[in-house]
Image (cartoon, grey):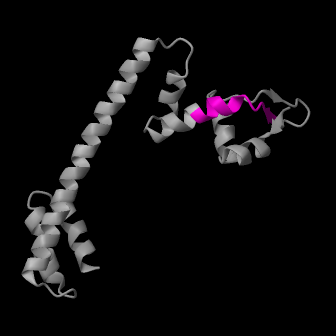
Amino acid sequence: MKLKIGEFAAFCDISVPALRLYDRIGLLKPASVDPETGYRYYDPEQIRALNAILSYKKLGFSLQEIKELLSEKLTAAALIQKLCDKQRENSRKSDVCRYHNETIQSILDAYQASGILENDQNAALRLSRIACLENESLEHELSQILWL
Protein backbone atom coordinates (compact mmCIF):
# COMPACT_ATOMS: atom_id res chain seq x y z
CA MET A 1 0.00 0.00 0.00
CA LYS A 2 1.46 3.32 -1.07
CA LEU A 3 0.70 6.62 0.66
CA LYS A 4 0.37 9.95 -1.12
CA ILE A 5 2.88 12.54 0.03
CA GLY A 6 0.24 14.36 2.11
CA GLU A 7 -0.86 11.16 3.81
CA PHE A 8 2.71 10.14 4.53
CA ALA A 9 3.53 13.62 5.83
CA ALA A 10 0.48 13.68 8.11
CA PHE A 11 1.17 10.18 9.41
CA CYS A 12 4.80 11.05 10.17
CA ASP A 13 4.02 14.55 11.48
CA ILE A 14 6.27 16.30 8.97
CA SER A 15 5.51 18.94 6.37
CA VAL A 16 5.01 18.17 2.70
CA PRO A 17 7.63 20.82 1.75
CA ALA A 18 10.16 19.01 3.96
CA LEU A 19 9.49 15.74 2.13
CA ARG A 20 9.85 17.52 -1.21
CA LEU A 21 13.17 18.96 -0.05
CA TYR A 22 14.37 15.53 1.08
CA ASP A 23 13.42 14.17 -2.35
CA ARG A 24 15.16 17.04 -4.19
CA ILE A 25 18.46 16.59 -2.31
CA GLY A 26 18.29 12.79 -2.52
CA LEU A 27 17.86 12.22 1.19
CA LEU A 28 14.51 10.41 1.02
CA LYS A 29 13.18 9.60 -2.42
CA PRO A 30 9.52 8.56 -2.78
CA ALA A 31 8.89 4.90 -3.50
CA SER A 32 7.31 5.95 -6.78
CA VAL A 33 6.25 9.03 -8.72
CA ASP A 34 3.26 9.05 -11.05
CA PRO A 35 4.73 10.08 -14.43
CA GLU A 36 1.52 11.80 -15.53
CA THR A 37 0.65 13.77 -12.37
CA GLY A 38 4.01 13.98 -10.64
CA TYR A 39 2.40 12.79 -7.40
CA ARG A 40 4.86 11.26 -4.99
CA TYR A 41 3.97 8.01 -3.25
CA TYR A 42 5.71 6.63 -0.19
CA ASP A 43 5.86 3.12 1.16
CA PRO A 44 5.11 2.63 4.88
CA GLU A 45 8.53 0.97 5.17
CA GLN A 46 10.09 4.38 4.50
CA ILE A 47 8.97 5.54 7.95
CA ARG A 48 12.14 3.95 9.37
CA ALA A 49 14.35 5.99 7.07
CA LEU A 50 12.41 9.17 7.88
CA ASN A 51 12.71 8.47 11.61
CA ALA A 52 16.48 8.14 11.22
CA ILE A 53 16.60 11.48 9.38
CA LEU A 54 14.52 13.21 12.05
CA SER A 55 16.57 11.67 14.84
CA TYR A 56 19.83 12.90 13.33
CA LYS A 57 18.28 16.35 12.83
CA LYS A 58 17.39 16.46 16.53
CA LEU A 59 21.02 15.70 17.33
CA GLY A 60 22.10 18.75 15.35
CA PHE A 61 23.30 17.22 12.10
CA SER A 62 22.77 19.17 8.87
CA LEU A 63 20.86 17.57 6.01
CA GLN A 64 24.12 17.09 4.09
CA GLU A 65 25.68 15.39 7.12
CA ILE A 66 22.60 13.18 7.48
CA LYS A 67 22.88 12.19 3.84
CA GLU A 68 26.46 11.10 4.51
CA LEU A 69 25.44 9.26 7.70
CA LEU A 70 22.79 7.30 5.83
CA SER A 71 25.09 6.49 2.93
CA GLU A 72 25.64 2.81 2.32
CA LYS A 73 29.33 3.59 1.79
CA LEU A 74 29.76 4.79 5.38
CA THR A 75 31.59 2.29 7.56
CA ALA A 76 30.69 1.65 11.18
CA ALA A 77 33.99 3.22 12.25
CA ALA A 78 33.26 6.36 10.21
CA LEU A 79 29.75 6.59 11.70
CA ILE A 80 31.17 6.29 15.22
CA GLN A 81 33.74 9.00 14.42
CA LYS A 82 31.05 11.37 13.08
CA LEU A 83 28.92 10.80 16.19
CA CYS A 84 31.90 11.47 18.45
CA ASP A 85 32.72 14.63 16.49
CA LYS A 86 29.14 15.86 16.88
CA GLN A 87 29.25 15.08 20.59
CA ARG A 88 32.41 17.19 20.97
CA GLU A 89 30.87 20.02 18.94
CA ASN A 90 27.71 19.95 21.07
CA SER A 91 29.83 19.97 24.21
CA ARG A 92 31.69 23.08 23.00
CA LYS A 93 28.37 24.79 22.22
CA SER A 94 27.12 23.85 25.66
CA ASP A 95 30.22 25.40 27.25
CA VAL A 96 29.68 28.63 25.30
CA CYS A 97 26.01 28.76 26.33
CA ARG A 98 26.97 28.12 29.95
CA TYR A 99 29.48 30.99 29.80
CA HIS A 100 26.86 33.30 28.26
CA ASN A 101 24.37 32.36 30.97
CA GLU A 102 26.94 33.09 33.67
CA THR A 103 27.62 36.49 32.07
CA ILE A 104 23.90 37.23 31.89
CA GLN A 105 23.52 36.24 35.52
CA SER A 106 26.38 38.60 36.47
CA ILE A 107 24.64 41.42 34.65
CA LEU A 108 21.34 40.62 36.34
CA ASP A 109 23.03 40.48 39.73
CA ALA A 110 24.68 43.86 39.10
CA TYR A 111 21.38 45.27 37.89
CA GLN A 112 19.57 44.14 41.02
CA ALA A 113 22.38 45.29 43.32
CA SER A 114 22.54 48.75 41.75
CA GLY A 115 18.88 49.55 42.27
CA ILE A 116 18.64 51.01 38.78
CA LEU A 117 15.18 52.24 37.89
CA GLU A 118 13.71 50.52 34.84
CA ASN A 119 13.36 53.79 32.90
CA ASP A 120 16.89 55.06 33.45
CA GLN A 121 18.53 54.57 30.04
CA ASN A 122 21.92 56.00 31.07
CA ALA A 123 22.09 53.61 34.02
CA ALA A 124 21.22 50.73 31.69
CA LEU A 125 24.05 51.76 29.39
CA ARG A 126 26.51 51.92 32.31
CA LEU A 127 25.35 48.52 33.48
CA SER A 128 25.80 47.00 30.05
CA ARG A 129 29.42 48.22 30.09
CA ILE A 130 30.08 46.13 33.17
CA ALA A 131 29.88 42.95 31.11
CA CYS A 132 30.83 44.27 27.69
CA LEU A 133 33.85 46.51 28.15
CA GLU A 134 35.66 45.19 25.08
CA ASN A 135 32.73 44.77 22.68
CA GLU A 136 30.99 48.01 21.71
CA SER A 137 28.41 46.31 19.49
CA LEU A 138 27.42 43.91 22.24
CA GLU A 139 27.43 46.82 24.69
CA HIS A 140 24.94 48.72 22.53
CA GLU A 141 22.68 45.69 22.03
CA LEU A 142 22.71 44.87 25.72
CA SER A 143 21.94 48.47 26.70
CA GLN A 144 18.97 48.38 24.33
CA ILE A 145 17.75 45.16 25.91
CA LEU A 146 18.09 46.57 29.39
CA TRP A 147 16.33 49.78 28.34
CA LEU A 148 13.34 47.79 27.05
Quadrant position of the C terminus in the picture:
bottom left
| Along the line of sight, the residue nearer the viewer: 89 or 138 | 89
Q: Position of residue 83 (x, y in %)?
A: 39, 26
User: Could you tell me if residue 9 is visible in this image?
Assistant: yes
> Is residue 49 highlighted in magenta?
yes
Q: Is residue 98 above or below residue 67?
A: below
Residue at screen point 49% across, 34% down: 56
Q: Is residue 38 above or below residue 146?
A: above
Q: Residue furthest right?
A: 36
User: Residue 119 lies in what quarter of the image?
Assistant: bottom left
Horizontal relation, residue 44 to residue 77: left or right: right
Residue at screen point 17% across, 58% down: 102
Q: Position of residue 72 (x, y in %)?
A: 57, 14
Q: Is residue 144 above or below residue 98?
A: below
| Along the line of sight, the residue nearer the viewer: 114 or 34 | 114
User: Residue 59 lies in what quarter of the image?
Assistant: top left
Residue at screen point 41% across, 15% down: 78
Q: Position of residue 26 (x, y in %)?
A: 64, 27
Residue at screen point 28% across, 31% down: 88
Q: How many marks?
A: 0
Q: Position of residue 66 (x, y in %)?
A: 51, 29
> Is residue 83 highlighted in magenta?
no
Quadrant position of the N terminus in the picture:
top right
Q: Which residues are magenta?
A: 40-51
Horizontal relation, residue 69 to residue 138: left or right: right
User: Could you tell me if residue 24 is visible in this image?
Assistant: no
Q: Is residue 58 above or below residue 24?
A: below
